[in-house]
Amino acid sequence: MLQLNLRAQVKLTGSVTDVSHHGLGYATLSLTDISTQKNYSTQADSAGKFGFDKLDKGDYRLKVTYAGFSNFETALTLNADTTLAIVLQQANNSLGLVMVTASKPVIENSQEKLIYNVSGNVTATGSDALTAIGKVPGIKVSGDEISIAGKGAVKVMLNDRIIQLAGTDLARFLKSISANQISRIELIKNPSAAYDAEGNAGLINITTKRSTKQGLSGNVQLNNKKWLHTPATVYGTSNWWMSDGSANINYNSNKWSAYANLNVAADHELEGFETDVYYPKQTWRQTDTGDYKMHSFNVVAGVDYKLSPKTTIGLSYLGGREVYVGSDNVNNPIYNSGGGLDSTLRTYATYHPIALSNSGNIHALIKFDTTGKKLLLNADYFNYYRTDRSNFESNTYSPVNQSIPTSNTRYYDTNKQNIKVFTFKADAEIPTSFAKIALGTKLSFINNYSNAFYYDKDANDNLTYNTNLSNEFRYIENTQAVYANISKEKNRWKYQLGLRAEYTETKGESITLNQTTPNNYLKLFPSVAISFQADTDNSFGFTFGRRINRPTFWNLNPFKSLYTAYSYGEGNPFLRPEYNTNFELSHTYKNVLTSAVFLNITDNGFNNVTISSADTNLVRTIPLNFIKTYRLGISENLALHPFPWFDNNNQVTFYHTDAHSGLDYIKSINGYGLYIATNNTLYFNADKTMAAAVNFWYQFPEVDHIGRSDRYYKLDAGLTAITLKKKLNIALNFNDIFRTSAQASTYTVNGIKTKFTNFQLNRFVQLSVAYRFGKETNTDNRDTGNEEERKRIH
């Protein structure tokens, strides 16, 4: 406990945390005036902060209680304002990992970040990482894009490291990670200079589970999911399902800390989209529905060893294999201006992608003295290797469903993508009498090779190499970064100033076209965070940051990817990064109500542009830099805990978007948007071993890049029960109950209106069973290696 006198008035404020300095939300505090025996009671907020106002000077006794932790009691003499930092120890008869996390609030919100405790969330139980991200209030998952409502796209990190994947590759990678492997998901709103500058609206950091308890412990979990489609039978089957199993094991001793997580999954699912193109004399309605079966396994493991009280070394590994086997069925009826059917274009394509991922890390933490000086060293390797083969056939049919022989188009293709990423980092923290200083550097080397070899296929299945469609592409990106960050607290003020410089060298090489596109640039990324604690109940904050969103490797590859005989997509080797500048001014009342005004400015913004030609009916999709966007808005977040058996978190974001187009054939657009969300958890007994959750969000129509989206919303519900001496956890969850979470956007390019609808078939019911095992013993103030230090200050 740390006690500090501040001013002449008598107030008692502070925080309640565990030994890892995680806030213990809603801890109960009882303060008794010894002279009068008058009792004051309060409850900490979701971040573990508390306050007592208007106290008489004198002697008091304070008692703090929290489920799963030993009670804390102390005597106090209050002659001035006093701040306490209370650290609770886990009780020797602790209920274990399951109960401790279940007692934590699901959502912890502060100026710096929002923490979503996956382990304690009912509706995330048994899901995957992508689904769990979509359950974080304010984060939207639409198809393959992850964004913050009203603010834009984000980058995803796993254990503090950027995942160098995007689009479908990222989505499938996240689906291979079980929520049972995840401890929490952090939305870092204004990352400091210590973080990579990528991610327009911030960063999402997924932290995998790792027990801090002594001894051997772990759990196993089995999940079975049933997809609920309308109609129930598609392509002659209604057997749309998913089953997966996961296991976690942890071992901690005085010097060793080791962990391993395994997830194995099998899935049969639908995915797809619809594109409606309104030509002057025709309307094309294209639906693309994928029927896929997936098999995957994923391993996360690591070990730390304490060489001395000041030095810890360790290594970690993440790897897996994913196989998606299936087919795309494209149906494209073409209607004339009178509404009659002119013809129908049908395409059938089979796919067999196999993806292997391997990631390794070696790290060392060196503490130089007791003042907090330390150095963290990291070396990382990441490899993503994906192969695919496909058979493609397209035919046109007359209005009476007769095949037109001359319309037959057949291809066979193979493709490969091999991404290798090497990174080296050094981060130092140097406390001084003036401020805490953080310095660091990072070297990143990315080498990406991809190819697509197309072959024309005749009626006898003979293959002829197609030089017009085939392509080999190599992309090399080297980035050197340095940063400095200063943080200081003085009286009721907190300051953080940071500057990151990144020098990037890129080279895109189309081997097939004999075309090389180099690009070098040096950019500065400042960050500022200032907060002022006006009184016990009110605090104010201001943040500023500049960030970058680099094009994906596929966006830079000029090769063509066929969708149908009349539509294709291609990359743009001349695509440049977009830059985002973020401002936010906020007010927080009792850590219950947070109000904010924000401004986001995107320069040199890029987006996929679908260009339809009325003359040829060809539909071409290519990414282009052409948007400058201003987004001004307000947000309100209200966290309530009115009863011990009820947790409630609500969010409202209202904003105006003004998107300026730099292309003559795309008009500028502006408009308002509104997002609302509520997360509710109800506990049916005092031990919180039986609970239910109901979560809902609603996105009103908004400006989406160069178009307007329709409204869409999502309702989830779940039940959970913990039994057998808190070792067995059974959960039943319903996801996207009304099947209404799919986004549809309408935009006009070259005078031709197009509407894109993402099916996003996310409605399912899932049963999960988890069992916790192992004998665990607690120790006081245990340092478990570098788990906390590796979470960089921001």
Image (tube, grey):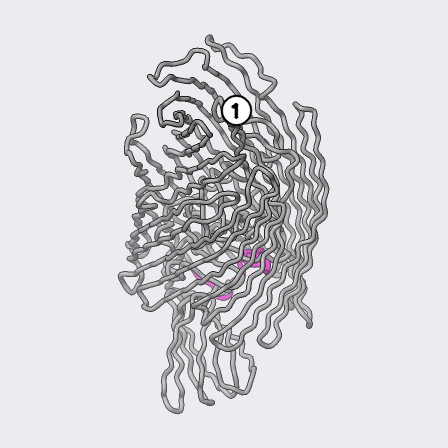
Query: Is any part of residue 394 visible from this angle?
Result: yes
From where the camera sits, is residue 249 visible?
no
Q: Position of residue 303 (x, y in %)?
A: 54, 49
Task: State the residue at coordinates (53%, 76%).
Answer: 534
Up the image or down, 369 lies above or below 565; here it is below
Q: Which residues are magenta?
A: 777-794
- As drawn, 167 above or below 425: above
User: In the image, is residue 420 part of the stretch drawn in magenta?
Assistant: no
**Viewer-side residue, 645 vs 29:** 645
Magenta stretch: dominant SS? loop
Judged from this view, the residue extending furthest toward the top is 460
Q: Position of residue 150 (x, y in %)?
A: 49, 53
- Front residue (pair 638, 479): 638
Magenta stretch: includes residue 788: yes
Residue 435 as seen in the image, left or right of residue 42: right
Q: Is residue 128 above or below residue 330?
A: below
Callout count:
1
| Residue hosting label 1 | 615
Q: Residue at x 38, y 14 (%)?
A: 403
SS of the residue under disc 1: loop
Q: Three-letter amino acid code at disc 1?
A: Asp
Residue 535, position as x, y percentages in the image: 51, 77
Where, by quadrant of the figure, is residue 39 drawn? bottom left
Rendered residue at 56%/82% (across/down)? 6
Residue at 47% x, 20% y: name it: 392
Q: Quadrant of residue 620?
A: top right
